[in-house]
Image (cartoon, helix red, strand yellow):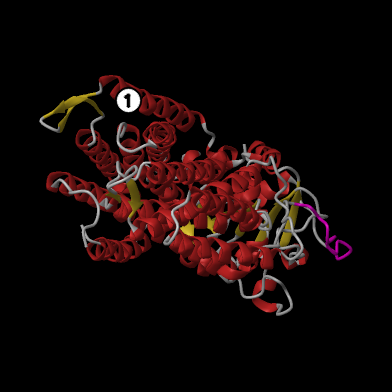
Amino acid sequence: MEHGAPVNPWAALAYLVAGVCFILALRGLSSPVSSQRGNRFGMIGMTIAVVTTIVTHFPMTALGALDGQPIFEPDLGLAGQILAAIAIGAAIGLVTARKIAMTAMPQLVAAFHSLVGLAAVLVAAAAFLNPLAFGIAQVIRPIYGPDVVTILQVSRVEMGLGVAIGAITFSGSVIAFLKLNGNMSGKPIMLPGRHVINLALLAGILGLIGYFLTDQSPWVFWTITALSFVIGFLLIIPIGGADMPVVVSMLNSYSGWAAAAMGFTLHNSAMIITGALVGSSGAILSYIMCRAMNRSFISVIAGGFGGDSGSGAAAAATDRPWKRGSAEDAAFLMQQAEQVIIVPGYGMAVAQAQHTLREMADKLKEHGVRVKYAIHPVAGRMPGHMNVLLAEANVPYDEVFELEDINSEFAQTDVAFVIGANDVTNPAAKTDKSSPIYGMPVLDVEKAKTVLFIKRSMGGVGYAGVDNELFYRDNTMMLLADAKKMVEEIVKSLD
Amino acid sequence: MDFISILSIFVLACFVGYYVVWSVTPALHTPLMAVTNAISSVIIVGALIASAAVGLGSGGAVSKWLGLVAVVFASINIFGGFAVTARMLAMYKKKVR
């Protein structure tokens, strides 16, 4: 079967090289040492892909015809417009990247995902409107009447899938952005019968993509697009704030599949390789996040779990006895310690306490205390969120440990210092079968000699809406205050 | 390229992606998301083709503008994604001994 436009072998080779550069970019992230080189590979790959496309698809205008063959001339005006479009995007992108606060990284990533989704929709729409330019159509010249342009059937499926995934990525990411940015409540919004609605929409989209094979009318294409925008929106609104790490990873995956689907349409190996890489990356991150919460992907997507921080709807049983400590007590205890493990969570990000926390760690080191950091995979609002914030505060990455690498050390640790984390330290996850978080891997902070737990007040509960057993233990001391203020006071007391 | 060759590239790339991503250290998962974001904007290739194709077919004018808008979005992502990744990666430092 003749499929698509003739491919320039040099261009195909260049796209393949670009794809390999993208593989090397991700490969570089296996260690912080090689990561910057990896990022440069990514930039090289992108440059190769863009330059190759501009050279092989240089804008041309038809001058006229000679011996029945059309003559083309480079269209420098259009080339200027394209370069201007790139320059506008570059300016916006670079300024945003420079100005954005590290704590706002989850929102930024969600916003970027929405742009990939929207770009995929626009490219699919352009390919639908002008299939000849993309080499995905046949022209039939009837004896009477105008030429008929038919889009190749395999391209219709690819295009339909591309526009659907792109639209879902776009509207889903917009909702995720609004939730992460606080423009919209992090609480799950539950529509009655939403599973039925979503399944019906999904069936409708797939059915229309099937129907698109026999009928390439515009209404089919645009209905697929519209339904996909709606389903992306409906999929994300019932998902609560604490499940956002899964959502962000999932949308990351979708943005990859959207690029891959468009790569199929354009027969472009760089796009296909990238799409497969990004798609698997997001899928693996979603899997890691779900495993760290001991929840199935389906239950996260079904939504309805977790709300805003400290919503305190289900009041904690605060009538149980608990101990309250002051900044001086905390400073005294940590000064005497041999080893302190700091457990940061989303609360640290909200309070912007990472820099003060590093000062505290520096002071403790001056007193001869060994300081380590323990990170739970779902701490924060996106995978690796805490690591970036600690890196921003100049915490060396070899002091920061993952759950499985440090969990056995709490038993030999004098002080566990919990700042802004809650559910990920709850011992009930190990013992209480009736708890909603039962079975979730948690940090064994209660095994430390003393647990210092910073919390705004005793009323609130964690995202899972469960009371934390840790608060009422004999070896726990609650430090009730804003995380940043409390750490500042501890730093003063350490002098 | 016929459909089967394209599909082969895709399937093999999924396997490459699987192994490469599992080797990424969890500490760098946020930069991973930022850089995958940047590279998935390789969709700019499609946007450039759409913008450059005028005079072919009837939808050329509309699809040119769709393409140009997509070029803007994709390049926000490309420049922003790589720059923010570089900014994050520069922060990861080893202990000074």
Residue identifier under label 1:
A83
Q: Is residue A469 above or below residue A10?
A: below
Return the residue found at the far left.
A67
- Image x and y of residue A163, in percent: 46, 51
Q: Is residue A492 left or right of residue A5?
A: right
Q: Is residue A178 left or right of residue A276?
A: right
Q: Is residue A219 magenta?
A: no
Q: Nearer the viewer, residue A422 or A13?
A: A13
User: Quarter holding the C terminus of chain A?
Assistant: top right
- Image x and y of residue B25, in percent: 39, 57
Q: Name the residue rendered at 32%, 44% in the picture.
A: A147
Q: Is residue B94 left or right of residue A165?
A: left
Chain of residue at mark 1:
A
Task: Give the class, few, some or many, for how many residues have Cα within 10 Å of label 1's Cα (few <14, many ≥20).
Answer: some
Residue A162 appears in the rendering: yes
Q: Name the residue rendered at 26%, 37% in the picture.
A: A47
Q: Nearer the viewer, residue B68 or A249?
A: B68
User: Quarter holding the N terminus of chain A?
Assistant: bottom left
Q: Is residue B66 above or below residue A114?
A: above
State the SS at label 1: helix
Q: Name the residue rendered at 37%, 36% in the picture.
A: B58
Q: Nearer the viewer, residue A470 or A468?
A: A468
- Dominant secondary structure of the residues highlighted in magenta in the image: loop
Question: Which contiguous range is marked in magenta?
Answer: A310-321
- Image x and y of residue A402, in percent: 48, 60
Amino acid residing under circle 1 = Leu
